[in-house]
């Protein structure tokens, strides 16, 4: 029985959803209790960054402390509520030598 | 009389703002049938096969997602009724033309996503005047040129994606207009060399990705001006010479050069990078290592898949922060362990000439070890025939050096029993070094 692949998907399986996305799209592995299902996106959801590689584009979870959205493995673009963003990291207050930009949660040196 | 006039004006304003927003207090904000609106100014009209920007959106829309549709061009004033728009998602359409006035009126626009379209050049006219723009995605288009005046006025831009395009050179002049830029990717293009002063105005840049290009040459002054750069990714290029330009990166923390063709690292290569924490030079053609003394912050060194035959005794001395040393698949015969007191992981698999037992004296905090031969694991516990060493036998000739704690030496026996060593000795891989490297 042929499986109908979801939007933007090139090859898929019934159990694991999308296995390979169309070019330029990102594959996100969603946890579905014990199973993982692949879906294809034009850009990764909040909490993930878009990793473009020659063979496959992937959504990778942001692993920076207290970070909500990130540009890469090491660079945060938005911190959790109440924290301050400085040079891609999140702080409870602006580090020494920097000050909060007027009314924003971002520090500037 | 004046009061009457004021009343009429007030009533008129209420009517206009009411109709503009398309609602009185009770009825919901207008939302085109093809969209899902969250009632808070967010509208998701993605993946609906649309060929034009939907009309009838609330004037108070601040987030509009029209990605994954079939919009091929943006006409002038395409968003004129959306003065409060902050985030506009247009990824995954077939956009090949953006009218110079397409974005006019969007003074609050912070995030603009144009990735995965058919643009051949940066829509510089349309971007002019977007003074609030902070994130701009132009990745996965077919951009071959970046007009000189591109990005002018984008004084708030912090994040710029230009990866996965067809650029053959670094857009030096356009990049010089971005004083607030902190993260830039030019990866997956066809850039062949980086000229001197290529990024000289990007004093706020923290992350620079240049991986998967064709970079063969980097000027000695290519990275001048990048005072705040912390991450430099040059993986998957065709560098043959070690880029000495990194000497002008005082805040560098992460350096990636893996999968190039670098054969030599010059002496004192990293002395100007006191905060360097991770260095990945794997998959190159490196034959020798310079001394790494002074790299006090260095935590991870990746040098697997090179051609390193010999390492000087003092190479790692003083690397108090070093946790991971990955040197698999080189041509090493011996490995100096002086200075590796705090090492947590050591990987030496694939160094087939390295047959001697490792000197476990300094490796007191080792937890993970991979070696070419199983018998070499026996010095690190986990073997039946291995008797835990008697501290007196250690005969530490040089005595604890200044950065060794005497009490550590006494813990030698117990610490090593918790090392996960591979390949683990066993019935077919006895501890005795019998017939050379037959196993």
Image: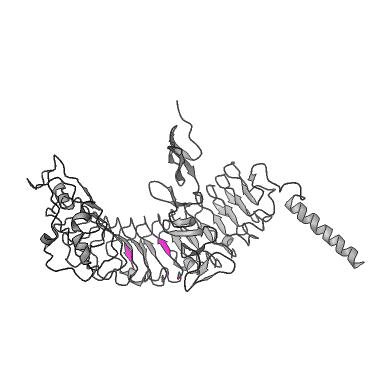
- Residue B142 versus residue B382: which sits nearer the camera? B382
Is B125 positioned to the left or the right of B425 in the image?
right
Q: Quadrant of residue B6?
A: bottom right
Magenta stretch contains residue B199? yes
Where the N terminus of chain B falls, by quadrant?
Answer: bottom right
Segment tinted magenta in the rendering: B196-221
Where is residue B205? Give x, y as percent.
44, 66
Is B283 positioned to the left or the right of B24 in the image?
left
Q: Residue furthest top?
A: A1
Q: Quadrant of residue B401?
A: bottom left
- Residue B345 versus residue B276: which sits nearer the camera? B345
> At 77% across and 53% down in the image, what residue appears?
B18
What secondary structure is the stretch in magenta mostly built from? Answer: loop
Where is residue B145? Give x, y as percent.
47, 59
Where is residue A59? Give x, y as percent.
44, 48
> Would you say residue B287 is visible in this rendering?
no
Where is residue B364? Give x, y as percent.
22, 59
Q: Residue furthest left?
A: B435
């Amino acid at each position: 029985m042929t499986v109908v692949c979801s939007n933007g998907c090139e090859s898929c399986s019934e159990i694991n959803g999308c296995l390979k996305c169309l070019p330029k799209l990102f594959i996100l592995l969603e946890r579905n209790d014990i199973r993982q299902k692949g879906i294809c996106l034009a850009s990764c959801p909040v909490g993930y960054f878009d990793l473009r590689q020659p063979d496959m584009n992937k959504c990778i979870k942001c692993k920076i402390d207290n970070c909500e959205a990130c540009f890469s493995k090491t660079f945060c673009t938005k911190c959790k509520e109440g924290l301050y963003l400085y040079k891609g990291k999140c702080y409870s207050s602006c580090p020494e030598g920097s000050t909060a930009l007027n009314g924003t949660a971002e520090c500037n040196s | 009389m004046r009061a009457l006039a004021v009343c009429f004006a007030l009533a008129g304003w209420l009517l206009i703002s009411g109709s503009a927003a398309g609602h009185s207090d009770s009825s919901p904000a207008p939302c085109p049938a093809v969209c899902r609106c969250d009632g808070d100014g967010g509208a998701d009209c993605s993946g609906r096969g649309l060929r034009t920007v939907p009309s009838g959106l609330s004037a108070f829309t601040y987030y509009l997602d029209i990605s994954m549709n079939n919009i091929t061009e943006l006409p002038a004033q395409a968003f004129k009724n959306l003065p409060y728009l902050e985030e506009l998602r247009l990824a995954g359409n077939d956009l090949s033309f953006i009218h110079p006035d397409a974005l006019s009126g969007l003074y609050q626009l912070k995030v603009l996503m144009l990735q995965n379209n058919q643009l051949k050049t940066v829509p510089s006219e349309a971007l002019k005047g977007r003074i609030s723009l902070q994130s701009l995605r132009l990745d996965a288009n077919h951009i071959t040129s970046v007009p000189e005046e591109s990005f002018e006025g984008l004084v708030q831009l912090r994040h710029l994606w230009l990866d996965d395009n067809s650029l053959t050179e670094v857009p030096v002049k356009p990049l010089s207009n971005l004083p607030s830029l902190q993260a830039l990717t030019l990866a997956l293009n066809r850039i062949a060399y980086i000229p001197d002063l290529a990024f000289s105005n990007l004093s706020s840049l923290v992350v620079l990705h240049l991986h998967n290009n064709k970079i063969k040459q980097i000027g000695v002054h290519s990275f001048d001006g990048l005072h705040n750069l912390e991450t430099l990714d040059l993986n998957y290029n065709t560098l043959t010479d070690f880029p000495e330009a990194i000497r002008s990166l005082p805040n560098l923390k992460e350096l990636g050069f893996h999968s190039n063709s670098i054969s030599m690292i010059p002496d004192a290569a990293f002395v100007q990078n006191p905060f360097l924490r991770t260095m990945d030079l794997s998959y190159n053609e490196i034959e020798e290592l310079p001394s790494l003394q002074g790299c006090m912050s260095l935590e991870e060194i990746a040098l697997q898949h090179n051609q390193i035959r010999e390492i000087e005794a003092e190479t790692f001395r003083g690397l108090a922060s070093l946790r991971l040393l990955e040197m698999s698949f080189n041509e090493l015969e011996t490995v100096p362990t002086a200075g590796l007191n705090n090492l947590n992981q050591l990987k030496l698999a694939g160094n087939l000439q390295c047959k001697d037992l490792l000197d476990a004296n300094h490796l007191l905090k080792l937890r993970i070890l991979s070696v070419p031969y199983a018998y070499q694991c026996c010095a690190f516990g986990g073997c039946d025939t291995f008797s835990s060493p008697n501290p007196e036998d250690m005969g530490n000739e040089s005595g604890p050096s200044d950065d060794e704690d005497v009490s550590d030496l006494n813990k030698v026996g117990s610490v090593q029993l918790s090392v996960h060593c591979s390949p683990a000795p066993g019935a077919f891989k006895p501890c005795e070094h019998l017939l050379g490297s037959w196993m």
